[in-house]
């Protein structure tokens, strides 16, 4: 099993919990899939795409729980990234941890599994 990570807006995530489905960020919706990262890529992804963004949660899920809707596809420099083609069931999320910003405007990450 591989733990994968997604950075979600806290308010959007709370609405998803209430509604039973999370469809991702605006960028995810536009791309047609929910972007996930591994423990080896999530910090770099946050720095590249989310520097200075407040109100984020780091969602953790087990890749095996996503079924065939999860596809590993090459992105930056051919590194494989997990993409979920469909909505995320909030009950599949292991944890949702607040990502605070450091003085450098980069997110402070917890120790990742």
Image (cartoon, grey):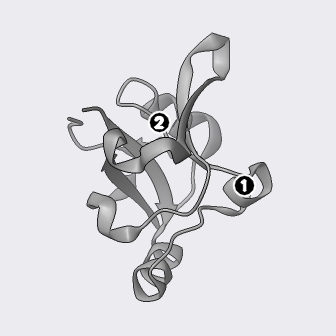
Q: Secondary structure at mark 1?
A: helix
Q: Residue furthest top?
A: 77
Q: Secondary structure at mark 2?
A: loop
Density class for disc 2 (Cα within 10 Å; few <14, some 14-19, many ≥20) is many
Q: Report the residue marked by disc 1.
A: 27
Q: Mark 1 or mark 2, which is nearer the start of the sequence? A: 1
Is there any visible trace of residue 103 in the rendered image? no
**Is 16 above or below relative to 99?**
below
Q: Position of residue 83 (x, y in %)?
A: 57, 40
Q: Report the residue marked by disc 2.
A: 37
The residue at the point 56 percent across, 35 percent down is: 71
**Is 16 above or below relative to 30?**
below
The residue at the point 79 percent across, 56 percent down is: 30
Q: Identify which residue, 101 or 44, lies in the foreground.
A: 44
Density class for disc 1 (Cα within 10 Å; few <14, some 14-19, many ≥20) is few
Q: Position of residue 91 (x, y in %)?
A: 31, 69
């Amino acid at each position: 099993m591989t733990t994968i990570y997604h950075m979600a807006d806290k308010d959007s995530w709370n609405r998803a919990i209430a509604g039973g489905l999370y469809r991702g960020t605006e960028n995810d919706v536009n791309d047609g899939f929910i972007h996930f990262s591994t423990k080896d890529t999530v910090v770099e992804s946050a720095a590249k795409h989310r520097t200075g963004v407040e109100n984020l949660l780091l969602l953790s899920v087990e890749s095996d729980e996503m079924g065939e809707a999860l596809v590993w596809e090459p992105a930056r420099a051919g590194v494989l990234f997990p993409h979920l083609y469909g909505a995320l069931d909030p009950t599949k999320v292991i944890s949702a941890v607040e990502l605070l910003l450091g003085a450098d405007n980069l997110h402070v990450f917890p120790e990742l599994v």
